[in-house]
Amino acid sequence: MSPTITELPLDNVLDSDIRDLQTNSLWRLTMRRLLRQQSAIVGGILLFFLLFLAIFADLIAPYDPLQSLIGKEELKQREDPCIHLVGCASDKPQHLMGIDGNYRDEFSRVIHGTRISLRIGFVTVGFAIIVGTILGATAGYLGGWYGEIVMRILDVVLAFPFFLLAIAIVSVLGASLTNAMLAIAIVSIPQYARVVRASVLSVREQAFVEASRALGAGHIHILFGRILPNALPPLIVIGTLGIATAILETAALSFIGLGAQQPEPEWGFMLASERNQVFSAPHLVFFPGLAIMITVLAFNLLGDGLRDALDPRLVHAGVKTQ
């Protein structure tokens, strides 16, 4: 259930927002706040563009990203980009981002890499949020010896450097993109669990929870129907920012050979494959790196906008200073 007006910190809410609460849900109000955030708008536009590329990658990419063009065209290894509109000879095949070291179209590989990277982000963070929410919610609600055991185990995981622990997990499981995603998900679980546990601890003793107990509501209904929805705003923000981190960390694992393998068009692996050609064929390093930068920037901007939209105090302060 959405919080009622009496459950919200009205001292920090704008007069216009109070009128909105009388007719709209909290989530609709959040969307209105989100549209006031320039960073969220820019991040949303970039994310929409990336989603469009991922969905229609098969139609946008002119070539198979996995197939070599040897024997089909007269090409040079790591040939420079050829764009007809900027002066490339019209009798030459057009390759917008050039040819890589295996005679594959770089543009097609970068486009299909969008699909892989977004899948990495959403699947990895989704898995970490589900497991972290269950652990954090039950640890915060039940408390006692169970909560202590769960949190101490998570503290042990947090004690290790994030990236080094991911490397260790992939080294045990074997180098592959799936194992890299699993490793990043595992090392991300504690941060989501701690956020959910903190929210549960702050809400479980409030009056509306006590009222539910007095009315005979069961523990599952109280936890997942009354308490847990209050943990969603911070979880959404940290999850959005976590997608950018997951994409970046998986690309780093692929760069050192522990993630994607040949011939997968994953951006980090594409950088690793051509890192020695940074001066002779810089386009093969520039375009995958640019794609990673744009994707991470999109989620970071959207995450910052969500943080401001979901915190009435930040919205209020922002309007006061304008």
Image (spheres, rainbow, N blue to C red):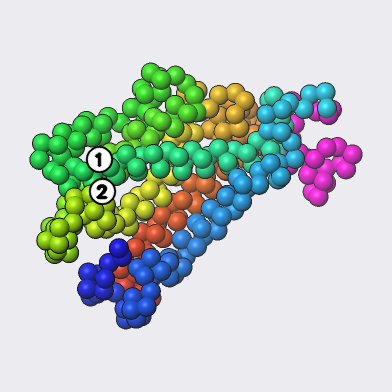
Residue 5 is situated, as x and y percent measured from the top left of the image, at 26, 74
Give the answer, above or below, for where 286 lies relative to 223. above
In the image, what residue occupies the spot 83% across and 23% down?
71
Q: In the displayed orientation, state which residue is furthest to the left.
A: 144
Image depth: mark 1 or mark 2 in front: 1
Q: Secondary structure at mark 1?
A: helix
From the viewer's perspective, is residue 94 above or below residue 171? below
Q: Which residue is mark 2?
A: 196
First to last magenta residue range: 73-96
At label 2, counting other C-alpha atoms closer than 10 Å, the crowd grade (few under 14, some 14-19, many 20 or more) is: many
Disc 1: CA contacts within 10 A as few (<14), some (14-19) or many (>=20): many
Position of the C terminus, as image quadrant, is bottom left
Pointer 1 residue: 135
Mostly what secondary structure, the magenta segment?
Answer: loop
**Which residue lies at the image location 43% right of the left edge and 35% below the top edge?**
249
The reply to whether discs 1 and 2 touch (Cβ–Cβ < 8 Å) is: yes
Which of the 4 quarters of the picture holds residue 21? Answer: bottom left
Kind of residue indicated by mark 2: Val
On residue 70, the disc is none
Q: Residue at x 67, y 29 (%)?
A: 66
Query: Considering the numbered disc 2 on the image, is that residue within a helix, a strand or a loop?
Result: helix
Q: CA distance from mark 1 to mark 2?
A: 9 Å
